[in-house]
Amino acid sequence: MTEHWQSRPEGGGRFALWLIRSIALLCGRRFARLFLYPITAYFYVRRRPERQASRQYLARVLGRAPTRREVFRHLHCFAAITMDRVYLLAYGDRAFEIETQGLDLLDAQIALGRGVLLLGSHHGSFEALRAIGARRPDVPLRVVLDKQKTPAMTELLEALAPEVGASVIDASQDGTSITLALAEACQQGALVALLADRGRDHETLRHASFLGRPAPFPVGPWLLAHALQVPVMLCFGLYLGGKRYRLVFEPVAERVVIPRNQRGPALDALIAHYAARLDHYAHLAPYNWFNFYDFWQQDLRVPAGGAGQPADVGQHASA
């Protein structure tokens, strides 16, 4: 429970993802979902740290100690969304009912022609955002993904949707390379999507209130937003059960400005807003939370809340 999230193995690894992919493609979604129960039971028994993290999170979001059934439901929701990734990548969104909220606001930002930075989280399905690609084929979607941390998921992505895999911006690159790739994508009017709730190893973090307790959030996404000077929106792909999803888009700013002499307060305000919206959607869809580690822990290797910045984050801003 005290490990940094990057030191934890990828959930299930290659075998689990291969199994889910094979079952999904061979059996069809309705029948394949029956296999989610034994798969979830396996992880419930074998992955004690994730089970403990689920119990800790659910206690905060529900305001009481969760039952074993609720912890199982949490893990089952993660398995269901993971299986749905296979269908979304292989066949698109035609097998799902996807409602949208704030799509008109997103269209308004796209119309500016400067690209849009979408900041998501490990809450719900980030993969469901690809439904926007089907509805706006004129707007490319570039997703930032750490290929070194998630090799099994990267292989799945490239096998099922090679064109999508080719559009991924690898987050394991150095900060300057990432920033230049994002800037190029925005110049092409693309939607650039990345997750903003987890700090990478040795990245500067700042605390904001989340589910009643200060939690560390990374500053890197906000320094990137400041460097790119493009519209920024929050995005959430909520799983509503069955085949239903809801895509939510909320504007943050047409340009994020972080004054050098007010960097700390400016970052705190941005991160506090992000954490408050994440708090809202965590209460709205509590079983959609997929940070299976102690999210509130103080990473002892990097002082959370400090104003300093390591080289990789500093490169984002300078680039």
Image (cartoon, rainbow, N blue to C red):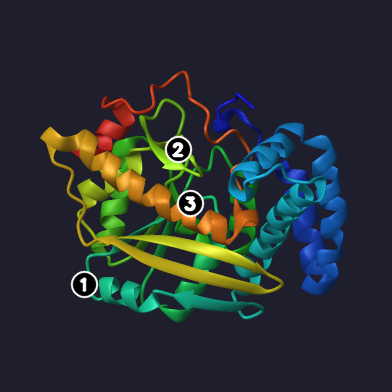
The answer to whether mark 1 and mark 3 are in CB contact below 8 A is no
Q: Which amino acid type is shown beneath numbered disc 1?
A: Leu
Q: Mark 3 or mark 1, which is nearer the start of the sequence?
A: 1
Residue underneath mark 3: 279
What's the residue at 44%, 75% (across, down)?
101
In space, the residues marked 1 and 3 are separated at their CA atoms by: 30 Å
N-term mark: 1 or 2: 1
What secondary structure is marked by label 2?
Answer: loop
The residue located at (59%, 48%) in the rendering is 61
The local secondary structure at tag 1 comes to loop
| 43 vs 306, nearest the viewer | 306
The one nearer the camera, 7 or 291, is 291
Q: Which residue is mark 2?
A: 172
- Camera-near label (1 vs 3) is 3
Q: Quarter of the image containing the C terminus?
A: top left
The residue lying at 86 percent from left, 60 percent from top is 35
**Which quarter of the figure has residue 277?**
bottom left
Identify which amino acid the numbered label 2 is placed on. Ser
Residue 26: percent from left, percent from top: 82, 68
Tell me which corner region of the image, top left, top right, bottom left or bottom right, holds residue 7. top right
As drawn, 175 above or below 142: above
User: Please, is residue 143 above or below residue 240 in the view?
Assistant: above
Q: Is residue 120 visible?
A: no
Residue position marked by numbered label 1 in the rendering: 112
Q: Amino acid at mark 3?
A: Asp
User: Dot 3: within a 10 Å radius of its alpha carbon, few (fewer than 14), some, or many (20 or more) residues?
Assistant: some
Measured in 3D between alpha carbons, the distance from the residue under mark 2 to the one under mark 3, in whole angstroms, is 28 Å
Mark pair 1, 2: CA separation? 30 Å
Which of the two labelled residues, at mark 2 and mark 3, occupies the earlier sequence position?
2
Residue 249 point in image, percent of width and height: 40, 67
Mark 1 or 2, which is nearer the eye?
1
